[in-house]
Each structure stands twice: as C-alpha cells, then as structure tokens.
Amino acid sequence: MPSFVFRVGTPDGDVVEREIRANDLRSAREEAQRQGLHVFTVKRRSRPLRTMLRPSRKALSTQHFLLFNQELLALVRAGLPIIHSFDLMLERQKSPRFREILTEVRDKVKAGVAISDAFAAYGNLFPPIYSSSLRAGERSGDLEGVLRRFLRYQKLIVNLQRKVVGALIYPAVIVAISLAMVLVMLTVVIPKFTEFYTGFDAELPLVTRMLIALAFTLRNNIVIWAAVVFGLYLAVRRWAETESGGMLFDSLKLRIPVVGDVLYKFAILQFTQSLGTLLAGGTPMVPAIEIASESITNRAISRRVHAIVQRVREGEPLWRSLDATGVMSDLAVEMIKVGESTGALVEMLTNVSEFYDEEIESTLSRMVSLIEPIILVVLGGIVAGLLYAFYLPLFELISVQR
C-alpha cells in the first residue's frame, strides 16, 4: 500500500508532517480529514525497490482476521468482558504482527478508548466497515449482532475471492507450462536444428529464417529481455498505484471479456453487502454509503458509487441515485426501490448481493468451461506453427532429392 506524506495543520495550531498509508490519494486525504487535520501539501513517498518486490510485512492475514472475529463473537456471546476476551485471544494468537496490534488495542480499550476507535486508529490496516460496524454496535448495545453480520459479510467476500482464484488456477498453470515449453523450443531446440541445417547447401524457407532470427535474438539477449520485462512490470505496478493510473487500470479490467463481467458483479456485491451490513447495524444512510463505496476494490466503480453521496444527502432516494449512475442493473435498482418503499431495504440489499453471488458463480462456471479449450487450441496452434516452421526444410529437402 503506498504512503503519502502530508504537511498539515493540527487542531492545536502546529504545522507538522504526517505519513498516511492508503490505497490512493483521495483515501489518504479523507483519512487526514477524519483525523481533524488541515492539509497544506501532500506528496507520494517513493518506495524502495525491495518493498516493491515483496508484500508488506505489516499486512494482516485475512485468515487471522476472520478467526479473530469468530473467537471475539463467541466470547461476547458467552458474556465475557472485552478486556478478558482480548487476554484470552492473545494467549493463542500465533501471528506476531497481529498479536502486537491486539495488545495495543487492548491497552487502549483498558485506558477508556472505545473499541471501534481503537481499531479505527490503524487507518486502512482494517476495512473501514469494521470500525464503523463496531461503533454502531456500541451505540445500539448490540455488539454481538453487529459482529455476526460482519462475519457473514466477511465470509461471503472471502469465499467469493476463493472461488475466483480457484477458477483461474488451472488455466494459469496451463498457460505457464505452455509458455515455458515454447521458450525452451525457441532458445534450445531451434538453435540445434539451425546447426543441422547449415550442413545443407539450400536456402531455408522464409518462415524458418524468421523463426531462427527470433530464436537467436531471444537466446543472445535473454538477460536484456528479462530486464525489460521486469522493468515494465515494476513500472506498470507503480503506475497502477497512482490515483489516475489506478482508475484507468481498473476501468480497463472491466472491459476484459468475461473477466470484466465477474469483476463488475463482484464490485456491486461488495457495495450491497457492505451497505446492508452497516444499515443493519444502525449506521445512518449517508455515512453507510460513504463507507460501503470505499469497500469496493475496483476504484472506477467505487468513484461512481461514491458520487451518489451528495444526492442522497440532499434527500434523493437511494434507488434513484444508483439508477442515475448506471452502475446497477434494472433488476437490482427495482429491488432496492421496493426495499426503500416497504422499509425492508436491508433485506433487499441482502437479496441483491445473493443474486450477484449466484450470477458470479454461474459466470465462473461458464468461463472455466470456455477458457480451457480456447487456451489449449491457441497454444496448440502456436506449438504446431513452430513445429511446421523448423520441419518444413526437411520436407522440402526430401522432395528435392526424390
């Protein structure tokens, strides 16, 4: 996650520098404003190469966070005080980083800080919906219900992510093995055939000469090519982390056939499920929309959804504001409209998220059934073309000798 260095004015009148980690500049500015800081200047902190090559050690495991909330819900349901619950969970916590954070949270709660504020102090290390849900639970006195709804939300998102990754593993393995095989043929097999062909006093076909030139260019400059590919990867990754680059990158992902449709539906599911969870916990509509829009991982859709906040704040119905963005399908908008009209908005939002969950699963099944034969046909054609190119001279020499 990129870091941004702010020169800000504090409520005490001091001008200081603060570093804030966020997904993009907009999120960083919003975090600074939530802390009551007045922003003068901001610049993005450059990242060392070593931090670009490995994930941040500060990142928390989703599995650890899910397990923590399951244990916390069980302990709260059993009637144990929060401090005692944290002490019990710290005894069995295996992640050093998470243990350190939970210890700090426990100490803050022991000092009188609300548990929601204790988690919110870590910024984007925890999802915004989490601290907001806890705050709503504290105000309503229903922390158990809020934790149960958040767990249901988290499990749905995690299971869906696993489905997407699982559906793409097999095609990715096929592509990786096939590309490795093509690379070996170009850098090892074809140069051997070239040595064999030099013993014949005959001009090679054009397609064979082109293939030989490509093979030797790749073989003799493989270090340069590897450095170029690696440099492009780092440049694209760095560009995708900027606000403008990230917006364009996420917009392009939505245009990928089939995959873009899955990403779009997943983004809408994130929004509806987050919004339903927050509203069910007692969070007011406008803050709930702001937080739910931030939970959308696709920044292009997140910005479009976030644009409805002002319209809803001015009194426009949620369904009409969403319909104006064109983000949601007519069916989803109609379900939300019925929910607002009947006072069952939370239930309808849950139904919409379940609808998109089923749609994603169906799309993934169709995608896997289509993508596997397509990959095999395309890569089979490439391999067949390579074989044809360096076996063609043999066929011509045989025909001449006859």
Image (tube, grey):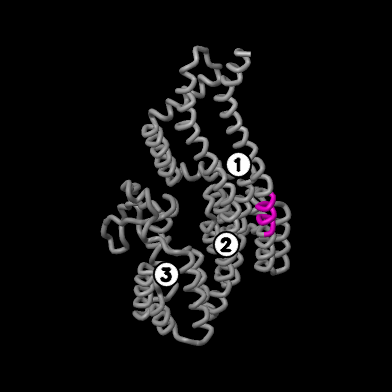
Q: CA distance from mark 3 to mark 1?
A: 36 Å
How far across and how far down the image is residue 44, in percent?
35, 47
User: Of callouts 3 and 1, which one flags the residue occurring earlier in the amino acid sequence?
Assistant: 3
The verdict on residue 58 being magenta is no
- Magenta segment range? 358-366
Viewer-proximal residue among 196 and 320: 196
Mark 3 against mark 1, which lies toward the viewer? 1
153 is higher (above) or lower (below) than 266: below
Binning the other alpha carbons within 10 Å of mark 3 as few (below 14), some (14 to 19) or many (20 upward) gives many
Classify mark 2: helix, strand or loop.
helix
* Amino acid identity at mark 1: Arg
What residue do we see at 41% from left, 78% from top? Answer: 92
28 horizontally vs 288: left or right: left
The answer to whether residue 41 shows anywhere in this view is: no
309 horizontally vs 231: left or right: right
The answer to whether residue 242 shows anywhere in this view is: yes
378 horizontally vs 62: left or right: right
Q: Which mark is residue 119?
A: 3
* Amino acid identity at mark 2: Ile
Query: Quick check: marks 3 and 2 in contact, CB under 8 Å?
Result: no
User: Of callouts 3 and 2, which one flags the residue occurring earlier in the amino acid sequence?
Assistant: 3
What residue do we see at 39% from left, 34% from top? Answer: 228
How far across and how far down the image is residue 219, in percent?
41, 30
User: Of callouts 2 and 1, which one flags the residue occurring earlier in the amino acid sequence?
Assistant: 2
How far across and how far down the image is residue 62, in percent?
48, 64
The residue to which callout 1 is attached is 255
